[in-house]
């Protein structure tokens, strides 16, 4: 797991300061070509040094992710989508919705958001950027189509963070 931290602005309302923070969480398997697109996007975002943003990467979402996201006002998830996904880039709002899955080691952004709400009383605003993958075989490079889509997602996330309009 890698972790980057950038400066966080402090806003003041009613004489009580609080942090305005966004977590961008990229996940997937870097050794399975396009499945590593979440990591690639976060590497590109790190170079932008966006204020009020923390970046975190992982192989997959885990129960502990719910505690991590509970500390933020907003969370942006970035992951690969299956080759059959209808669009190259899909952006969707995530709402808490825990579901039992057939695979025991599988959680969705909606699952971890639900766990955050239940366990920690926090429900950050959340968005998922899914980038359609083409090749999930062993390898460490993205396919050209996925790399191109990833650069578009980097721009969309930077605009989203700068505007604060989740």
Image: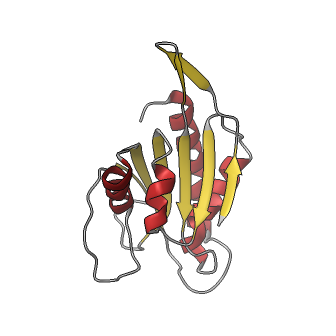
> Looking at the picture, does residue 35 appear above or below residue 153?
below
Residue 47 spot, x, y in % from top left? 74, 46
Q: Name the quarter where the N terminus is drawn.
A: bottom right
Q: Is residue 69 visible?
A: yes
Residue 97 spot, x, y in % from top left? 26, 58
Q: Is residue 147 visible?
A: no
Q: Is residue 154 left or right of 118 when viewed as pictured?
A: right
> Looking at the picture, does residue 97 appear above or below residue 70?
below
Residue 43 spot, x, y in % from top left? 69, 56
Q: Is residue 99 left or right of 112 when viewed as pictured?
A: left
**Total labels drawn:** 0
Q: Name the quarter where the C terminus is drawn.
A: top left
Residue 44 spot, x, y in % from top left? 69, 52
> Looking at the picture, does residue 113 appear above or below residue 62?
above
- The residue under the point 36% across, 67% down is 85
Find residue 49 and report its image quarter: top right
- The residue under the point 48% across, 51% down is 69
- The residue under the point 63% across, 80% down is 31
Residue toward you, 66 or 161: 66
Kindly give the residue lying farthest to the top in the view shown: 14
- The residue under the point 34% across, 83% down is 103
Colour scheme: secondary structure
> Looking at the picture, does residue 26 appear above or below residue 31?
above
């Amino acid at each position: 797991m890698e972790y980057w931290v950038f400066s966080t602005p402090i806003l003041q309302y009613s004489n009580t300061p609080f942090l305005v923070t966004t977590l961008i969480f990229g996940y997937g398997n870097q050794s399975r070509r396009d499945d590593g697109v979440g990591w690639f996007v976060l590497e590109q975002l790190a170079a932008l040094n966006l204020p009020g943003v923390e970046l975190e990467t992982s192989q997959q979402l885990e129960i502990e992710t719910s505690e991590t996201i509970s500390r933020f006002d907003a969370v942006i998830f970035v992951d690969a989508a299956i080759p059959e996904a209808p669009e190259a880039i899909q952006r969707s709002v995530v709402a808490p919705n825990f579901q039992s899955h057939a695979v025991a080691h599988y959680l969705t952004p909606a699952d971890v958001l639900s766990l955050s709400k239940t366990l920690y009383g926090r429900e950050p605003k959340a968005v998922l950027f899914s980038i359609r993958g083409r090749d999930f075989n062993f390898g460490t490079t993205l396919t050209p189509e996925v790399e191109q889509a990833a650069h578009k997602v980097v721009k969309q996330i930077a605009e989203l963070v700068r505007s604060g309009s989740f």
